[in-house]
Amino acid sequence: MNYRSVAGNLFILLLFQWLLSGIVHANSELPRFLDTVPLQDIYPGADSIGHADGTPVVAPAFKQGEQIGYIFLTSDYVNTTGYSGKPIHQLVAMDNNGIIQKALLVEHHEPIVLIGIPEERITAILSDYEGMDVGKLVQGTLDHDVDIVTGATVTVMVMDDTILRSAIKVARQYGLAGLRPERKKTGPTASINNDINTVQDWTALVREGSVRRLKLTLSQINTAYDQVADFRAADFPEQGAADDVFIELYAAVVSIPGIGRSLLGESEYKNLMKKLQPGEQAILLAGDGRFSFKGSGYVRGGIFDRFQIIQGDTSIRFHDQYHKRLRQIAAEGAPQLKDVDLFRTPANMKFNAAEPWKLELLVGRDVGPTEKIFLTFELDYVPPKKYLTFTENKVSIDSAEKAEPFWKKMWQLKIPEIIVLGIASLILTVIFFFQDALVKRAKLTEWVRNTYLVFTLVVVGWYFNAQLSVVNILAMFNALISGFDWTYFLMEPLIFILWGSVAAALLFWGRGPYCGWLCPFGALQELINKVAKRFKVKQYTVPWAIHERVWTIKYLIFLVLFGVSLYSLGWAERLAEIEPFKTAIILKFMRDWPYVLFAVAVLLPGIFIERFYCRYLCPMGAALAIPGRLRMFSWLKRYQECGAPCQRCGNECMVQAIHPEGNINVNECLYCLHCQVVYVDDHACPVVIQKRLKKQRHTVRKQAVAGKKNSAIAEVMALNKVDVKVDFNK
């Protein structure tokens, strides 16, 4: 029995089960966390948990057979996206009286925490929610101030905001703490009147409320901090005259035609309308003073961490992809302001430009080397009625609005990236299907490959953060064993698409298409080596006897990780740091020095030995190599002479995937196509060189027989003397 074949078949079947089963199993992740987290850590005092059900999903908690409360996952109810662009999952337990019993952080991918802030500092704030009465919170009789951790502002804000909003929704849904589902309006419903396009000056816009202002002076800021319970806040007042401007912030909805044309100008307004997708709206924020509403979070992590938009139970935080910086406000008489910025609201947030909303501005004050105290100030916005139309709504609905699955929101947010990655995958497929035509043009093949590697590193890796990892494989097997939940894998659309591409490629070409073309870290290694060669850095060839033994290390690493994952997936994820992908690609080397040092140490040998990490250490490559042997087709062509006596391709293979006998080891092949370029090159491949010389000799003989010029006869004589014994090792 071929055990490698059986293992590979099993891997393929499991991978396709993972890819296909999601069509019908896109449910909440709540069951997964309930299975892995001890009950007493979730709901102290409960002795059992019932079946998770409902829309959104909740799980009833029981004590001695009597239901005592509910357990839910915040990401099922509200948008929990943080710095990473990925959901922050928190389990919340609430009793029948609407009192929160426990809040637990169960999973996150926040780089701001990974790169140095201890997770204990983040999770410590969750104890403040125990005993919180959600009913009093809704009534406004409960004071609640979140203890924001310096350096993790957005993460803590998301955690706090999502716990409160999801708890309120669950309480309303199940009638806890005297709350009832919010009734939809029975009166007139407001919508934007697109027929009103009158352009007005700045003074008129401010007077009618189309532009709203929040102005804070140094005196107001200092007074606000004087009233904070922590006495240290008053020890660091803002220096300057009392009436100096701390911040003067203006806000307006510019997707309302009359307001947008006035503030943006006709040209910029038209550009905005072209860019707005269905369901999106646009807000203009402009500010001046010593404090900027933009902050620096959008530079570090792409998110604006000093403000958020609140409308009903929805909070919106903006990422840089929804932002555009403007030079000035176009309205006549508008002041010159330091910051003028345009923000689009994501369609899945369902922001209604015709309804009131508010902006929450977060202001921080340093009270120590690593500590800050934060205060929140609000700017309320109500769109003027002159820009609205009203229609009667005769339907009253007394049930909670169904929430859209969070994974769908993630796909909607990533539509541009999905399109780009889809096109890139299609291009790579075309390259492989028509490789015979491509490899006949050596320079074009090299240009195509180098361009694709740069795209993979810069776009797929550093911009999209779409780097596959052995952790994905371990998580898939763990999910299949412990109860498959498709939603977990759908949360990452780009990773999902890449895995789909890998599954298809394994059947046709093996692991080469991903490892050789679509792996950002692999692309980084190869590009570094190409630069080294340009600078004439000496390259070393590992002796075959050593090479064929050392490449087994990556398989041993994978087996160790796989074995550990069966015991503890968490430990396996920690050990998977042997992959420097997170450091070099996801976090772009912005991490603690030991991780950066390891990543550099892994890349350094690649300067002298091509794809060093891929050859000998990569557990991801080892995992893909197992099913890679089951490919259905042999697309890489070989001659009988390959290996005996010809060693040309074997000597030039960048990862030494060609055995001395001439056969290509698909476990190690990265499908760079260099051997195929040589295969058809009649000035490189000894076999083809011989064929070319024989053909030329035959042509000249025919010309001589046909009575051509005497020079032809001379050429025949010359060719007859040609030594066609080519060096098969060069």
Image: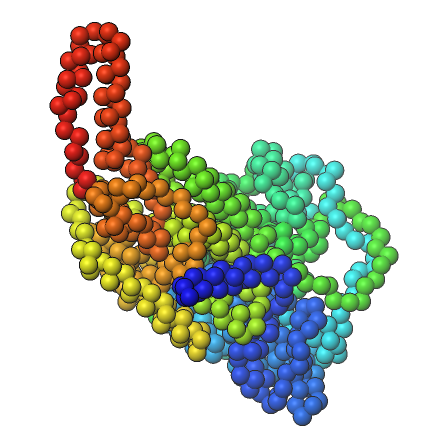
Name the one closer to the observer, 689 or 720: 720
Please identify the quadrant where the C terminus is shown.
top left
Residue farthest toward the bottom in the current orientation of the protein: 64
Which residue appears at 49% of the width and 42% of the height?
426
The x and y percentages for residue 467 are 42, 56
Please identify the quadrant where the N terminus is shown.
bottom left
The x and y percentages for residue 272 are 59, 40
In the displayed structure image, the side of residue 605 where residue 29 appears, left or right: right
- The answer to which image quadrant residue 536 occupies is top left
In the displayed structure image, the side of residue 42 where residue 604 appears, left or right: left
The x and y percentages for residue 508 are 46, 49
Name the one closer to the observer, 231 or 73: 73
Which residue appears at 23% of the width and 16% of the height?
701
The answer to whether residue 329 of the structure is visible from this angle is: yes
- The answer to which image quadrant residue 113 occupies is bottom left
Q: How many marks?
A: 0
Name the one closer to the observer, 286 or 190: 190
389 lies above or below 114: above
- The answer to which image quadrant residue 55 occupies is bottom right
Name the one closer to the observer, 388 or 90: 90
The answer to whether residue 463 of the structure is visible from this angle is: no
Which residue appears at 24% of the width and 31% of the height?
689
Which residue appears at 37% of the width and 70% of the height?
559
Residue farthest toward the front in the current orientation of the protein: 705
